[in-house]
Image (spheres, helix red, strand yellow):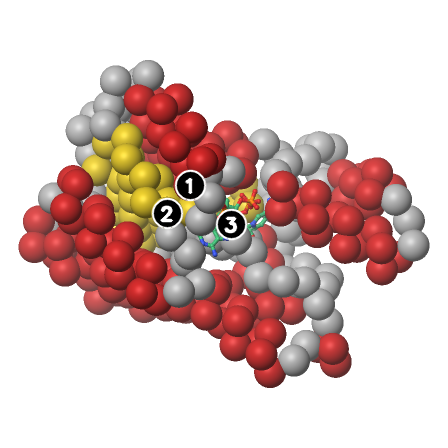
């Protein structure tokens, strides 16, 4: 299947590691020009060099997605370097874990800023150009928590629902301009973030990280944790010409973890 991604310009947020890195790698391998974005410059520089081996252009912008002014600068860098954006992958570090009674006002606002507003700001920065060119692919990395809340991930459970509502509404407003808006909802995927969350759960329960991993795995119908590349494959398809009639959806990649019918 030809995904027709060659030469498309992709901005991948949170892409020095984990799921974002796998998505950026997949898009570069398909011939996209890619703008990497995360906080740690050294990791971005090393990845950019690695991905240039696929033959396409790869640039990076060091950005703290928690800061609106950094997002504006990253959007400007995308316009300056690539002249616009065809594919926007909105991804970021996850919000902090915790439970309702211990969550402070400050932590609520930080979760809102990180998970909902970074997505809003990235899309707002790229959207006018996508409308002008009558083409765009917007892919938000959310979580299986939008289908079924995850224990101790109150902020994720709350604000990813917000991203989902925003994306659905936006898809209704802009799909006539050749722009699709979709969410990819990972289940348990092997990344640094996952290790942090398993460590948090293990500490709270007084068990080992390996115990947590075994408990989680036992609840996944496929009997294993997913790999970041398995998210990237779906993101690559949604970014492609082949996904031209898919918009406003949330697609889980979770090995069957979500038992809901829809
Ligand atoms: N892994 C899972 O099982 C899973 C499941 C469901 C949902 N998710 C969600 O998917 C997203 C990606 O998760 P992941 O597992 O790939 O995480 P990860 O391995 O921790 O990678 C996060 C990436 O985002 C960057 N990042 C973090 N905070 C940032 C900030 N403030 N500004 C800019 N870049 C930032 C990191 O680089 P720097 O640190 O250098 O900035 C890194 O490149 C998260 O929102 C996570 O909650 C993950």
Q: Give the CA distance from mark 1 to mark 3.
A: 27 Å
Lower sequence index among marks 1 and 3: 1
Residue on which disc 1 sits: 41
Q: Is mark 1 within 8 Å of ligand 1?
A: no
Q: Is mark 3 within 8 Å of ligand 1?
A: yes
Residue on which disc 2 sits: 62
Q: Residue at x 88, y 57 (%)?
A: 205
Lower sequence index among marks 2 and 1: 1
Percent position (x, y) of residue 183?
A: 42, 52
Q: Give the CA distance from mark 2 to mark 1.
A: 6 Å
User: Which residue is at the far front?
Assistant: 42
Percent position (x, y) of residue 164?
A: 43, 63
Q: Residue at x 63, y 50 (%)?
A: 258
Percent position (x, y) of residue 15?
A: 43, 41
Left or right, 160 with respect to 30, comes to right
Q: Quadrant of residue 156?
A: bottom right
What label sits on residue 185 in the rendered view?
3
Left or right, 101 with respect to 248, comes to right
Numbered disc 2: secondary structure:
strand
């Amino acid at each position: 299947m030809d995904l027709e991604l060659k030469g498309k310009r992709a901005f991948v947020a949170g892409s020095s590691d984990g799921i974002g890195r796998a998505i950026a790698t997949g898009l570069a391998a398909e011939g996209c020009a890619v703008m990497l974005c995360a906080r740690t410059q050294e990791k971005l520089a090393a990845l950019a060099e690695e991905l240039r081996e696929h033959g396409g252009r790869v640039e990076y912008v060091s950005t703290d997605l928690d800061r609106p002014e950094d997002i504006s600068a990253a959007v400007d860098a995308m316009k300056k370097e690539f002249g616009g954006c065809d594919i926007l992958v909105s991804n970021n570090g996850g919000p902090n874990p915790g439970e309702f009674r211990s969550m402070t006002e400050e932590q609520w606002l930080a979760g809102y800023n990180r998970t909902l507003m970074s997505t809003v700001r990235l899309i707002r920065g790229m959207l006018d150009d996508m409308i002008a060119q009558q083409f765009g692919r917007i892919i938000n990395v959310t979580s299986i928590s939008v289908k079924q809340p995850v224990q101790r991930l109150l902020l994720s459970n709350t604000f990813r629902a917000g991203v989902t509502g925003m994306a659905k509404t936006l898809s209704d407003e802009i799909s006539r301009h050749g722009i699709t808006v979709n969410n990819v909802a990972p289940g348990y995927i092997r990344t640094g973030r996952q290790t942090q969350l398993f460590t948090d759960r293990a500490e709270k329960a007084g068990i080992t990280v390996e115990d947590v991993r075994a408990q989680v795995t036992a609840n996944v119908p496929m009997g294993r944790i997913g790999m970041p590349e398995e998210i990237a494959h779906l993101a690559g398809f949604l970014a492609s010409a082949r996904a031209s009639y898919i918009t406003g959806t949330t697609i889980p990649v979770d090995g069957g973890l979500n038992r809901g019918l829809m």
